Amino acid sequence: MASERSHIGTSLQFDDVVTRSLEALYQTKDAARRRDGVLDALQLQSGERVLDIGTGPGFLAADMAEAVGPGGQIHCIDMSEPMLDMARRRCAGKPWVVFQPGAATDLPVGDATFDVAISVQVYEYITDVTKALFEMYRVLRPGGRAAIVSTDWDAITWHASDSARMNRVLGAFAEHCAHTALPRTLASKLRQAGFILKEPRVIPQFNPMYNPDTYSYQIARLISSFVPGRQGVTEEEARAWVEDLRQTGERGEYFFSLNQYLYLAVKPE
Ligand SMILES: C[S@@+](CC[C@H](N)C(=O)[O-])C[C@H]1O[C@@H](n2cnc3c(N)ncnc32)[C@H](O)[C@@H]1O
């Protein structure tokens, strides 16, 4: 709805409206499966100290808190107050999860402080990714592990009855972040920052059906509120785009596929 849009002229703003949209997205089975993939790759140990950079609504922080237990710490950094508020509420009752406002490019924590640093779906929003990766490296202890997840937004496959409209909407949505294809250059940027790369993984988001418990259903809501007024896309066109997705689903012809990439890396001893 027009009244709910507060981010015209800029990339995605993590305000109250977007925070609630992301909470709905992160409650889907697809998002839970992504968190499981991250936790499986990280193999957190009891007592570990973890930095969660761009913690967002706090779902992963809450899961990581269970893994490290009260003898460990999950230190959550985010630039958005609405996100920090929501994450605080989600992790209430776990005092070993702590929250601090801050920027990924200037982390408000000391050198070599953490066993693990993680950042899921954050670096594509940051203009100077290399600076953020050097910061991540700085705060890890020697031998510490890093995990970064990023989406290749330029490689969405999304079936629609009007492919020209789909292209216009996705073209306008490309404005939502600074880097729409960050996974393609992350490996070299991580090496440049000093990391040793470990096993890379891909987390597919594949939805052959249209329903609220899927990644694509929820991201479509976020997209349709973001694109009006950008690159000539109107409110009406955005609404028609969502309606087409619904009808495509009703006809049993729905198809959405997108890859998210998980890079594991280690700071040398
Ligand atoms: C898409 S959400 C990701 C949330 C979470 N990491 C997850 O599990 O997917 C992006 C988050 O990164 C935060 N963020 C964006 N740019 C940032 C920056 N430069 N420094 C710190 N946080 C940032 C936003 O406020 C938002 O909470």
Image: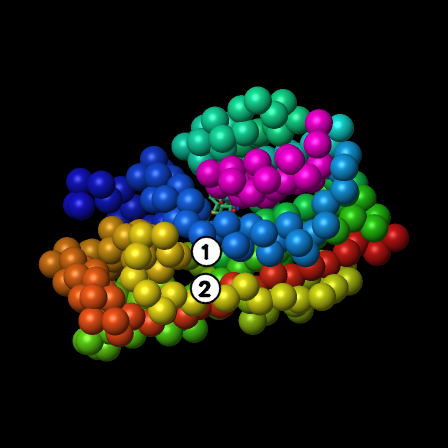
Q: Which residues are magenta?
A: 50-70
Residue 250 image position (x, y, % from top left): 20, 66
Could you tell whether 26 is left or right of 134 in the image?
Answer: left
Q: Which residue is mark 2?
A: 205
Say which residue appears at 75% left-offset and 28% top-offset: 71
Relative to 191, 118 lies left or right: left
Horizontal and vertical percent position of residue 38: 61, 53
Q: Is residue 160 visible?
A: yes
Estimate the spatial distance between the alpha carbons at disc 1 and disc 2, rounded to whole Å. Answer: 7 Å
Quarter assignment of residue 61: top right
Q: Which residue is mark 1?
A: 30
Secondary structure under the numbered disc 2 in the rendered image = strand
Q: Pointer 1 and pointer 2: residues touching (CB < 8 Å)?
A: yes
Three-letter residue code for mark 2: Gln
State the residue lying farthest toward the right. 269
Q: Nearer the viewer, residue 229 or 199?
A: 199
Task: Please report whichever mark, 1 or 2, sits nearer to the chain's N-terminal start.
Answer: 1
Q: Give residue 203's position: percent from left, percent from top.
A: 54, 64
